[in-house]
Image (tube, rainbow, N blue to C red):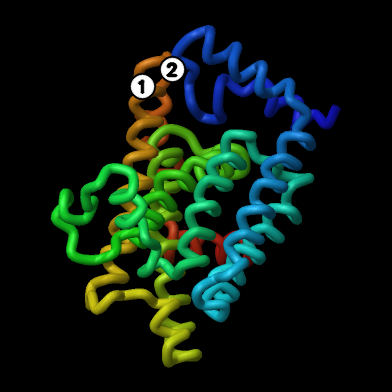
Amino acid sequence: MNPDLHKLTHYPLMPGLASPDGRANADAAMLSKIPRGRYLAVLGGLLAAVIVRSGIGAHYPGDWRLENALVAGFLVLLAATYRRLPLSRVSYTLILLFLCLHETGAHWTYSEVPYNRWWQSLFAVSLNQQLGLDRNHFDRLVHFSYGLLLSYPIREIFLRVANVRGFWGYFLPLDVTMSTSMIYELIEWGAAVTFGGALGDAYLGTQGDMWDAQKDMAMASLGALVAMTVIALINARYKRDFARDFIDSLKVKHPAPLGEEELARRREQAHG
């Protein structure tokens, strides 16, 4: 067995998350016994079915193609890094859940997903009226889910690649979620300007809200903040060295200033 994969199967429930009890560890051990290739094949099959179904009868085919261009690039990146950096089954599952939500928005366009009609058919009441909403908020849900579901895979990468500890293991996933959310809004803006017309409007989906981009970024940030707070609270409760790691991560490791001081030191070394 690949030693890196062997290490993955011995994580306590999830990477960077302490196990609350023996049963959770037993469940995680049982999950780790499922062949990784088989588990990912099932997830891949489900995702492929969701994407195909999303494309069938898509309300705005041009928008569907735009929405899935980033998905295709993301999946290529996951495949390209799989051998050197296979993520946990938990991370891949969270990614699948988010992409399923995204494909729902791609099928209808985010501003036209009829969640309110679905709710009315089930409960005979309007969800928007119950919550006092005056617009379609499916896009807000997906942006919130972006932070809630994807900040954990981002955290796993930071823990395993950058070896971050303590405070930085919670702050950096939040920071990356916020920055990538901003980048996505810039991509939306660029696409809307480039394609214009009905396609640009469908892809942008502001629904007349001039602060739409800022609110979307805020929702993604809130989702990531919730996820990181929950993980931190669980680790604080069950991880004995949580406080020490947190405090040590905030200590100054290199007291000497950088910038011009470091440049001067390097010049002195170079001239001997």
- CB contact under 8 Å: marks 1 and 2: yes
Q: Position of residue 73 (x, y in %)?
A: 65, 66
Is residue 220 visible in the rendered image? The answer is no
Work out how far the residue at label 1 is from the one at label 2, CA to CA, in angstroms: 6 Å
Is residue 185 shown left or right of residue 15? left
- State the residue position of label 1: 236
Q: Nearer the viewer, residue 152 or 203?
A: 203
Is residue 104 shown left or right of residue 41? left
Residue displayed at 43% across by 17% down: 239
Q: Position of residue 253 (x, y in %)?
A: 44, 39
Q: Amino acid at mark 1?
A: Ala
Image quarter for residue 259?
bottom left
Residue displayed at 28% across by 75% down: 207
Q: Nearer the viewer, residue 199 or 91?
A: 199
The number of callouts visible is 2
- State the residue position of label 2: 239
